[in-house]
Image (spheres, rainbow, N blue to C red):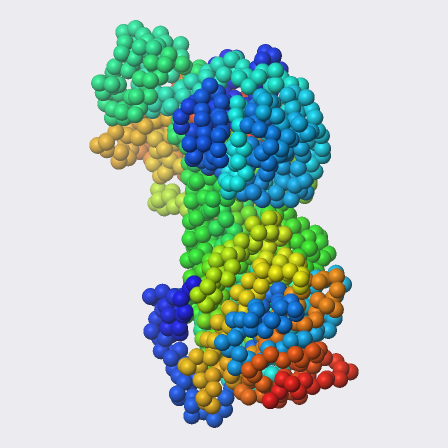
């Protein structure tokens, strides 16, 4: 298991010894606002984040409470409210797959508007606009969308923060160093996202080019030795260019080096047409932890108050291998392809969801879901540490509206209603606005749950059409 | 018709043999004895002869794919049998790329096994021969499943595991010696034959393009274990073709100990010996001996350039006694370092090669050793060809209809010359400036495009679904990247699209980004080809399309070429496509690039003769000279369709008024002529055609200012002579010995450039080489440093134009009296004609030509000459030769 990474070691781990002092000093100065110095501040910032994990938890398993797959959330039970029986509206479009439909409704309660747009805003953005009508304070990243995902077709599989018009609220940052750059690389992004967006896309182009050149230098290259050496030279030049074109301009004075490249596949290589990729558990967890640390650091340093964090896309297709341990015990030994005795997409873990049967043990599904909740819990717990206390003495976790959700996970695509029923949700107290400390069978439509939350957060704007009559879910409010 | 100096009569050059190996084998297979095994299409053969070490691939094809045994305790060997008594790991040491590539290209295969199963109960199927990664990922596997044999073949239509499989009938797998053959033809027809008779048939549809080149070849189990096969293997053979029923029976009748024919094996031995001589021995003789012992020098009356003369020997009799190096004075003299005289001794390795060659019988497979062939050491280095600046501009223009020439020439570093051309692949390096330029140019190109309109040429799909993105990427990419988009590329470009979508971008923006990425991708800025295959590869149809277009047009393939490539008809209809391409104006434009590069005409832009000596010189005159040469070439080659050698002596030219005055051409010699389009950009004046029949000295490329200026202000005989020798005669001279003062000697009254040259030629230390090339420039003595014709130099010395030409390989020089006679001699020389073919070919293939290419060059030259020796004939011969239709001997993994 990877070591727990604190603020300082995060930076050391990512940038190595070349992380410059100016960055650390600058960050400490900002970080201090969240510590003792901020205690003098009168207001606690309003924050809202959406945390998504792929494939979901079948409704019957949720009934097992913290004794089952929800076990990793148990240590945080006093700061969470688990919501069972949340049903989403029929969000499907013709020809669109159910994973996508279900994920699209998460945090929006709306059917998607095509492959790249949500049907409406996500709850974090509604809260953002309610509290920061004139924009966030200078130097703040308006919205941070980040996540680790390998299923890329259709945006709402993995993006979980949307503007009022259903467009993505911020460019998805899919590598730890992208998050690093986005949050700490530039200081004047609050008034507009276009430069950063363009740079992000340019980097994506360059990354794809780098990947292709890397392929031609690798073992599978069709080129002979001389040509491979030539292309390797080319690759070196690109890296030099990359440093000059992107990194050097971004760095604070004194220069923090660009964090190392992620070891995981990203971009197009991450999703070979839905066929899935092999994924050692340790690599995945290491990336998740790094991303979670960075995201938490971004919140701690008050660079980010809104956004989303994704732990795998809806309908994710990975062939995971490796021992999964929790609380000192071996929970399961992942080896999806071998256990499914299949390759390609048929050898991916999402098959366990399709095979879900209430009458069976569903051993593999349980282990996968348990493991993802462990990582979600890790992220949440980073915001519950002592150095994450706001002016009111509560932790960021307690003061923020953090909504954890997923897709249905029952794998019953032939029954869309059931597919979208009983979608797992968990929420944080949002500075005393919501109940915590247990599991609540709300048995309600997601849109009503969300609108109840928005109302509690002081938003006049609610989700859904004007015709929709919201049923407030009092059970979740204090 | 002159006889080729390179190959023996009736003999096929080694390179040709190698590159057309399968063809030769095919011819051979028609006359094999009944008990010979089929060798046509053979890729791998295991006969299990050895008792220790690796299991050797005895196919004799390319790089052997040997197998190592990693669990010896479960394996017994001996008597031509591999006995498997327990689970074993027997696998290729490296991924058998040669095999997988050959099968992927042919789409057909045969797996043949002589075996005795230990029982008829082993299942799994138990893996007998497998090309796979593990129990669920494979290319192909022959196995035993109880009392049946079972073959899983992965195609684009089957599962990754090669399912559904094809099984032999029940009870066909028995613990007795059995001959099992699985064939799968390119049309998908698969057959399992048992003991020479077909038993089951099935269509296994789908191409084999998805075969993974990384999967190892293994016997008797999967690499991941758990599927062991027990029994005896007597023979395993794999072909990249589907054997016919007759051939299957032939191999069955040949039995488990059947051999390839003795004739074929003997032929391979002869080829190996010839290859050794041509690639190892001849280069040593050429570099160390021929300077003094060629046809012209014959020191000690010994000529080591030809087989007959070498066998005859010199003053002291034969110097080579086949089989007995200790009695061969050639070997003894180099072993004692007595030879080479006055030159560094041979290295130990070179001496060993000579000794072994003599000991092995001194096979001499060449009629004549041409030192020019060995100028470039043989190399396995096969450099991927980056687009030159010109090619980049042409590719952008023709692919995207954007003229990026001015920006590209400003931003991209110029391509540097190497071995006479600026498109030499090994020298096409990449600098940080390239990366920056390609990035900027890509953005600029895309900004100038109507991307939606462009993309709609290929696909109307505009959604961000996998299928829609795939459709638009595959179709657009095929055109932009000059061939099919790979899955990996598809994923990458789809990743860009989803990134843009994830940032709230539109489909148009996404495609702009995809195009920007494509323009910077290796598939665009390089001409990527499959280079690894152990020497048995042929270019794919798309690779061939690019080869043709860049060689003939200097730009990308057009839609007709790509369509033909996609349909698999290009190589079959090669001639028709070549004819079409040569009649396209792009071929004409590209020929100008050859001329400009070959003669380095761009140097005129930087020429700065001494202003006091040459007050008439001006940059405009330099451009006129460049324009003259380009227009002359266009007139001779395209307007008159004359042979390339006519460039030497066609007595006309096209000159601006400024140049004509400089040349002092009389107006009476002028003919009305329209401005020549191809060279219009090079000068500010109209070009006029002049008949030079009555003009003293002028007529032919060498008498034009663009070339005469190569001699510098002093009109150096050395530089001009070397130009003729290197560029037209492919002569080879060594560098001056150390301590020789090479400072140019000035002329003065009573001492001309010729007299200074004669002093060098008379000097024993210098004359051996200078006598070969300086007389070539004597005929140009009357042209001064910037190409003006005169009868006296500035000191009043009378100048002459008589001289001699010593054609490399000939024993005696030929005299000439005038510059015109020199030009005629050159024009009529087959050596010059052959050299021009070599130059065009080098430019075409983008690399120096070496010994391995010589035989093919001879064939190209003969074919070109037989068709008139024109540019189009030469290009046609080149692009239909093995240099283009075959892949150079490429390395294995």
Q: Residue reaching furthest top?
A: B317
Front residue of A446/B125: it is B125
Q: Quadrant of the N terminus of chain B?
A: top right
**Residue plotted at (33% across, 73% down):** A21
Say whether residue B705 is visible: no
Front residue of B812/B578: it is B578
Residue B742 location (% of width, % of height): 26, 34
Say whether residue B362 is visible: yes
Quadrant housing residue B746: top left
Front residue of B627/A24: it is A24
Q: Is residue A143 above or below residue B648?
A: below
Front residue of B591/B24: it is B24
Q: Is residue B219 above or below residue A319?
A: above
Residue A189 location (% of width, % of height): 51, 76
Q: State left or right for residue B77 relative to residue B770.
A: right
Q: State left or right for residue A321 relative to residue B569.
A: left
């Amino acid at each position: 298991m990877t070591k727990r990474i604190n603020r300082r070691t995060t930076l050391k781990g990512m940038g190595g010894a070349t992380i410059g002092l100016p960055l650390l000093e600058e960050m400490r100065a900002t970080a201090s606002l969240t510590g003792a110095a901020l205690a003098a501040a009168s207001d606690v910032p309003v924050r809202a984040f959406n945390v998504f994990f792929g494939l979901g938890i079948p409704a019957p398993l949720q009934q097992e409470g913290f004794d089952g797959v929800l076990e990793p959330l148990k240590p945080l039970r006093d700061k969470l409210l688990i919501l069972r029986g949340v049903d989403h509206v029929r969000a499907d479009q013709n020809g669109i797959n159910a994973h996508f439909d279900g994920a699209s409704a998460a945090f929006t309660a709306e059917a998607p508007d095509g492959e790249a747009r949500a049907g409406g805003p996500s709850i974090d953005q509604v809260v953002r606009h309610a509290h920061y009508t004139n924009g966030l304070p200078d130097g703040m990243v308006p919205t941070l969308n980040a996540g680790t995902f390998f299923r890329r077709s259709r945006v709402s599989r993995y993006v979980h923060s949307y503007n009022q018009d259903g467009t993505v609220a911020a460019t998805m940052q899919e590598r730890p160093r992208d998050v690093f750059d986005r949050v700490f690389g530039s200081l004047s992004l609050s008034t507009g996202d276009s430069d950063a967006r363009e740079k992000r896309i340019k980097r994506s182009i360059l990354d794809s080019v780098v990947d292709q050149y890397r392929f031609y230098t690798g073992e599978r290259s069709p080129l002979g030795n001389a040509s491979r050496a030539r292309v390797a030279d080319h690759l070196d030049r690109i890296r030099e260019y990359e440093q000059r074109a992107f990194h050097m301009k971004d760095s604070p004075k004194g220069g923090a080096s660009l964090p190392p490249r992620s070891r995981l596949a990203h971009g197009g290589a991450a999703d070979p047409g839905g066929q899935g990729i092999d994924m050692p558990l340790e690599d995945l967890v290491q990336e998740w932890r790094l991303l979670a640390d960075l995201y938490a650091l971004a919140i701690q340093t008050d660079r980010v108050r809104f956004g989303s964090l994704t732990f795998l896309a809806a309908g994710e297709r990975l062939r995971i291998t490796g021992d999964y341990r929790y609380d000192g015990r071996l929970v399961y030994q992942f080896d999806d392809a071998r256990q499914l005795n299949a390759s390609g997409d048929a050898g991916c873990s999402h098959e366990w969801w399709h095979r879900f049967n209430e009458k069976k043990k569903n051993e593999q599904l349980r282990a996968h879901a348990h493991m993802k909740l462990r990582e979600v819990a890790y992220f949440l717990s980073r915001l519950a540490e002592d150095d994450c206390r706001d002016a009111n003495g509560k932790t960021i976790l307690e003061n923020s509206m953090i909504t954890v959700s997923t897709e249905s996970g029952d794998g019953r695509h032939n029954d869309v209603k059931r597919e979208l029923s009983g979608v797992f949700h968990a929420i944080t107290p949002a500075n005393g606005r919501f109940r915590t400390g247990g599991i609540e069978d709300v048995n309600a439509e997601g849109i009503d749950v969300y609108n109840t939350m928005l109302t509690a957060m002081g938003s006049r704007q609610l989700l859904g059409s004007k015709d929709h009559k919201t049923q407030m879910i009092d059970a979740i409010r204090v | 018709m002159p006889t080729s100096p390179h190959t023996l009569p009736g003999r096929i050059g080694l390179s040709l043999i190698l590159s057309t190996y399968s063809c030769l084998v095919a011819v051979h297979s028609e006359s094999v004895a009944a008990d010979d095994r089929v060798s046509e299409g053979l890729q791998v053969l295991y006969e299990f002869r050895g008792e220790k070490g690796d299991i050797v691939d005895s196919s004799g094809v390319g790089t052997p794919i040997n197998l190592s045994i990693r669990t010896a305790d479960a394996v017994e060997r001996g008597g031509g049998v591999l006995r498997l008594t327990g689970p074993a790991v027997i696998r290729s040491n490296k991924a058998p790329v040669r095999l997988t590539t050959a099968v992927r290209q042919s789409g057909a295969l045969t797996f043949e096994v002589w075996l005795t199963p230990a029982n008829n109960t082993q299942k799994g199927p138990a893996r007998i021969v497998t090309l796979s990664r593990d129990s669920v990922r494979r290319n192909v596997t022959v196995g035993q499943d109880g009392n049946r044999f079972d073959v899983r073949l992965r195609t684009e239509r089957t599962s990754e595991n090669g399912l559904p499989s094809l099984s032999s009938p029940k009870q066909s797998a028995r613990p007795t010696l059995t001959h099992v053959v699985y064939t799968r033809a390119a049309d998908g027809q698969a057959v399992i034959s048992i003991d020479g008779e077909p038993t089951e048939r099935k269509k296994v549809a789908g191409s084999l393009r998805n075969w993974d080149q990384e999967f190892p070849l293994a016997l008797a189990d999967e690499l991941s274990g758990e599927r062991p096969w027990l029994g005896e293997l007597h023979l395993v053979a794999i072909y990249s073709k589907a054997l016919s029923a007759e051939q299957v029976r032939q191999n069955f009748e040949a039995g488990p100990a059947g051999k390839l024919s003795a004739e074929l094996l003997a032929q391979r031995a002869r080829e190996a010996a010839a290859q050794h001589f041509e690639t190892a021995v001849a280069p040593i003789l050429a570099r160390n001996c021929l300077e003094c012992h060629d046809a012209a020098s014959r020191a000690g009356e010994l000529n080591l350039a030809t087989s007959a003369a070498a066998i005859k020997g010199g003053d002291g009799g034969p110097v080579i006694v086949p089989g007995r190096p200790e009695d061969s004075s050639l070997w003894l003299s180099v072993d004692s370092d007595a030879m080479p005289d006055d030159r560094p001794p041979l290295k130990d390795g070179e001496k060993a090669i000579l000794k072994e060659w003599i000991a092995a019988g001194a096979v001499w497979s060449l009629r004549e050793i041409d030192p020019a062939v060995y100028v470039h050491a043989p190399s396995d280095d096969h450099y991927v060809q980056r687009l030159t600046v010109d090619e980049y501009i042409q590719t952008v223009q023709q692919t995207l209809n954007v003229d990026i020439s001015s920006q590209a020439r400003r931003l991209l570093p110029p391509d540097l010359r190497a071995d006479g051309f600026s498109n030499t692949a090994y020298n096409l390096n990449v600098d940080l400036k390239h990366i920056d330029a390609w990035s900027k140019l890509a953005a600029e190109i895309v900004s100038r495009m109507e991307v939606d309109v462009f993309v709609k040429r290929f696909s109307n799909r505009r959604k961000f679904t996998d299928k829609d993105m795939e459709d638009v990427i595959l179709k657009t990419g095929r055109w932009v990247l000059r061939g099919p988009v790979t899955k990996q590329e598809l994923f990458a470009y789809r990743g860009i699209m989803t990134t843009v979508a994830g940032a709230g971008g539109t489909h148009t923006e996404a495609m702009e980004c995809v195009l920007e990425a494509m323009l910077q991708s290796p598939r665009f800025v390089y001409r990527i080809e499959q280079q690894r295959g152990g020497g048995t590869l042929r270019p794919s149809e798309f690779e061939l399309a690019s080869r043709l277009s860049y060689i003939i047009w200097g730009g990308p393939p057009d839609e007709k070429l790509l369509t033909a490539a996609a349909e698999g008809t290009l190589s079959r209809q090669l001639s028709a496509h070549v004819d079409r391409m040569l009649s396209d104006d792009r071929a004409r434009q590209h020929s100008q690039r050859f001329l400009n590069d070959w003669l380095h005409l761009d140097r005129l832009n930087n020429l700065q003769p001494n202003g006091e000596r040459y007050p008439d010189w001006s940059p405009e005159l330099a451009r006129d000279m460049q324009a003259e040469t380009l227009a002359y070439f266009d007139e001779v080659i395209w307007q008159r369709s004359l042979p390339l050698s006519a460039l030497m002596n066609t007595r006309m030219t096209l000159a601006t008024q400024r140049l004509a005055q400089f040349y002092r051409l009389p107006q009476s010699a002028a003919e009305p002529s329209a401005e020549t389009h191809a060279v219009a950009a090079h000068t500010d004046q109209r070009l006029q055609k002049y008949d030079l029949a009555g003009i003293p000295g002028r007529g032919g490329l060498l008498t034009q200012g663009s070339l005469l200026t190569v001699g510098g202000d002093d009109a150096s005989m050395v530089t001009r002579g070397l130009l003729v020798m290197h560029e037209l005669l492919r002569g080879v001279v060594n560098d001056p010995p150390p301590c020789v003062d090479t400072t140019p000697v000035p002329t003065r009254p009573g001492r001309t450039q010729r007299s200074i040259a004669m002093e060098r030629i008379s000097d024993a230390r210098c004359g051996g080489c200078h006598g070969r090339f300086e007389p070539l420039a004597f005929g140009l003595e009357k042209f001064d440093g910037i190409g003006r014709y005169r009868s006296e130099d500035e000191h009043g010395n009378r100048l002459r134009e008589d001289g001699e030409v010593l054609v490399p390989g000939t024993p005696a020089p030929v005299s000439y009296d005038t510059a015109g006679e020199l030009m005629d001699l050159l024009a009529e020389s087959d050596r010059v004609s052959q050299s021009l073919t070599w130059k065009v070919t080098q430019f075409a293939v983008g690399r120096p030509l070496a010994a391995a290419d010589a035989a093919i060059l001879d064939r190209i030259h003969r074919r070109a000459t037989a068709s008139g020796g024109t540019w189009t004939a030469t290009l046609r011969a080149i692009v239909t030769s093995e240099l283009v239709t075959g892949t150079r001997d490429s390395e294995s993994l």
